[in-house]
Image: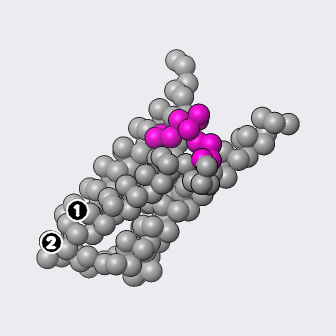
Amino acid sequence: MTALPRQRLCKWGFWAGLAGITGAALGPFAGPELTPSHGDKLNHILAFLVLGLLGAGALVPDAERRTQKYGVAPRITALFVGLLGYGIGLELVQGLFPARQCALGDVLADGVGIGLGLGLASLIRWAETRKKAQ
């Protein structure tokens, strides 16, 4: 059995993560919140950090990961905007459920998580590039 390329593993993980987060956000809600409010924000940050990291590995081929003329690769920008739009959409749909609520703080936490995930992906690429140069 051969190892799957990293890009394919990231792609599978990204789509599985989207499905899992959607299920957790919109699935049945039973009982009171088990975590305090700051714990909910941490969950948002961690979930979207993982999506940002996996998305960068899945949706941005190595040749296009290089920084463009204005300092931001267009696909990374599209990934950030797309994931933030996904987070906003989840919040709006949650507002339709009586046991859920739509919260601006959750969207802000999503944005922080996406930024951290993309930053971590950039740091990993930088370290790999530096290692190859040596």
- Residue placed furthest toward the front: 69
* Callout 2 crowding tier (Cα within 10 Å): few <14, some 14–19, many ≥20: few
Return the residue at label 1.
26
SS assignment at label 1 = helix
Task: Indicate whether 59 appears above or below 41.
Answer: above
SS assignment at label 2 = loop
Q: What x and y, as percent, mark residue 123?
A: 67, 52
For residue 100, the mark is: none
Magenta stretch contains residue 123: no
Name the amino acid type tagged 2. Answer: Phe
At horizontal 81% and vertical 36% (from top left) the residue drawn is: 133
Return the residue at label 2.
97
Q: Quadrant of residue 62?
A: top right
What segment is highlighted magenta in the picture?
A: 58-68
Q: Earlier in the sequence, mark 1 or mark 2?
A: 1
At horizontal 60% and vertical 54% (from top left) the residue drawn is: 70
- Residue placed furthest toward the bottom: 37
At horizontal 54% and vertical 28% (from top left) the residue drawn is: 5
Does the image show residue 51? Answer: no
Describe the colour scheme in one phrase.
one colour
Task: Indicate whether 86 appears above or below 11.
Answer: below
Name the amino acid type tagged 1. Answer: Leu
Q: What x and y, as percent, mark residue 57?
A: 53, 42
